[in-house]
Amino acid sequence: MRFSHGRGRLCSTAVTAETAVTAETAETAETTGNAPSPAPVTLLVAGGDVVTMNPAREVLVGGAVAVAGDVIAAVGSSTELAGRHPEAEMIDATGCIVTPGMVNAHQHLTGDPLIRSCIPDLLPPGASIFEWSVPAHGAHTGDDDELSAVLSSVENLANGVTTVVEAGTVANPHRAAAGMRRAGIRGTMGVWGWDIEEGPFTAPAAETLDRQREMVDSFSDGGLIDGWVTLVGHDLASDELLAGAADLARDRGTGLTMHMSPTSSDPERYLARTGRRPLAHLDALGVLGPHLLVAHGVWLDDDEVELVLSTSTAIAYCPWAYLRLGQGVAGQGRHAEIVERGGRVALGCDASNAGDTSDILRTAALAAGLARDTRVDPERFGAHTAFELATIAGAAAIGMDDRIGSLEPGKQADMVVHDTSSIGWAPRGETVLHLVWGTDGRSVRDVLVAGRLVISDGACATVDIASLRAEATAAQQSLLERAGLEIPHAWPHVPSA
Ligand SMILES: [Zn+2]
């Protein structure tokens, strides 16, 4: 981070006509109350090229974002905003690119961060979940859940992700939420809900719904964490639980998320049990709708795609996980088509053994690459569409575009400063092409969530990383022993001395 007071470190970047108009608009909003901002402007992120993701998709060259408390007060020219707010602290983003914080719509904050990249990749379908992830979840202590959530949250933040949708914590969701708070990330929290016969914390539908209700209600304070109804999904829920979960989400005005159809397994099971494919069955139960975020939705047929579109059901698309697990996205995925037909799609990074890294820029590049290559069509679904999914469209898919996803007055001050001083940026290319195709989370320098600086000059400002690393290393060994897991090496690891 480049942190200074006043205007001393501002560059004298020329203000384009386009920028000036936007600045005037922003300042008008600031002063007329169209975007009320009762708190004084305390911080300027100034001098960078601001990728606003506003409806016109303006990129303000040498622009600035003024922050008042936790919200964006104005977006405009650096010179004008610095003159208007001389006492504000300043993050000098000269030469940098400033973007909205990115959205990761499917992230397992607990379960396998402590055994990241450990589960062998040459396993039959389902084995990684039931032979590895489930025992690991089962052995987790409350300390493990909180530590895992800190680890995953910090990694997400360091890569410019400011909002995560947690995919379901089994045992200690409140500890996982505490981990999110320690890191300072925004997101949703949910407890793993299922009512099958065996498994950790499985319970009859009514009891499972009670636990879900308690979770949702305990995160209704308007803070950084929203409580979501969170089912495991797949074919691991009764019709009663599925319908009750949707009713609960609608009743509380919150989201519902569950896994469905990353492979052919869910369609096969639903057809055998109900005579319908999964989303057709969910539709018959009244489960589909704008409140629902389906994780994956890779194996959909034509009718299911139409149902996704007609019900405004959202999908969290995690392409790295499908490639890592060999699930068939290149042949089966319909996500690009759903995006182009106006559907709600966000990007996700899934789990620490399914995609492994939590980097939405890397995911955006893959989403665009798959869309283009699988259709052998270089004229559709480029970097700009992918970056929309990473920001404003992703925010819309998780129902938060009124708060996040773009840099506009009145929105939450979630933003990322991308450093362009490394050789990978020399010479600078087209702004969005370079962001998506030419870099990834490695360029992230500073990150703000709700106006709070959580990553500063590439370092975590909220958590001591050396201590976190030591804690995680010790916890991994203990967890593996308790879970009865041993990580095999495919190649012999031999002592070198
Ligand atoms: Zn998942």
Image: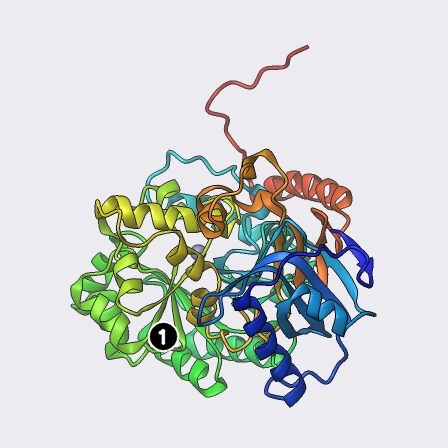
Crowd class of label 1 (few under 14; some 14 to 19; many from 20; radius 10 Å): many
248 or 315, nearer to the observer: 315
Q: How many marks?
A: 1
Residue 2's spot in the image, x, y percent? 76, 52
The residue that appears at 65% across and 55% down in the rendered structure is 141
For mark 1, give the secondary structure: helix
Residue 85's spot in the image, x, y percent? 77, 72
Residue 254's spot in the image, x, y percent? 49, 79
The residue that appears at 46% across and 52% down in the rendered structure is 432
Q: Is residue 82 above or below residue 470?
A: below
What colour scheme has been applied to the protein in the rendered image? rainbow
The residue that appears at 59% across and 42% down in the rendered structure is 442
Q: Quadrant of residue 417?
A: bottom right
Residue 331 as seen in the image, left or right of residue 136: left
Q: Quadrant of the C terminus?
A: top right
Residue 86 as seen in the image, left or right of residue 187: right
The residue that appears at 30% across and 70% down in the rendered structure is 342
239 or 95, nearer to the observer: 95
Residue 271's spot in the image, x, y percent? 18, 63
Can residue 465 be seen in the rendering of this structure? Answer: yes
Per the image, the residue denoted by label 1 is 242
452 or 296, nearer to the observer: 452
Residue 434 as seen in the image, left or right of residue 341: right
Look at label 1 and name its amino acid: Leu
423 or 163, nearer to the observer: 423
Residue 260 as seen in the image, left or right of residue 479: left
Q: Quadrant of ligand 1?
A: bottom left
Q: Quadrant of residue 6?
A: bottom right
Can residue 194 be seen in the rendering of this structure? Answer: no
Q: Is residue 490 above or below residue 354?
A: above
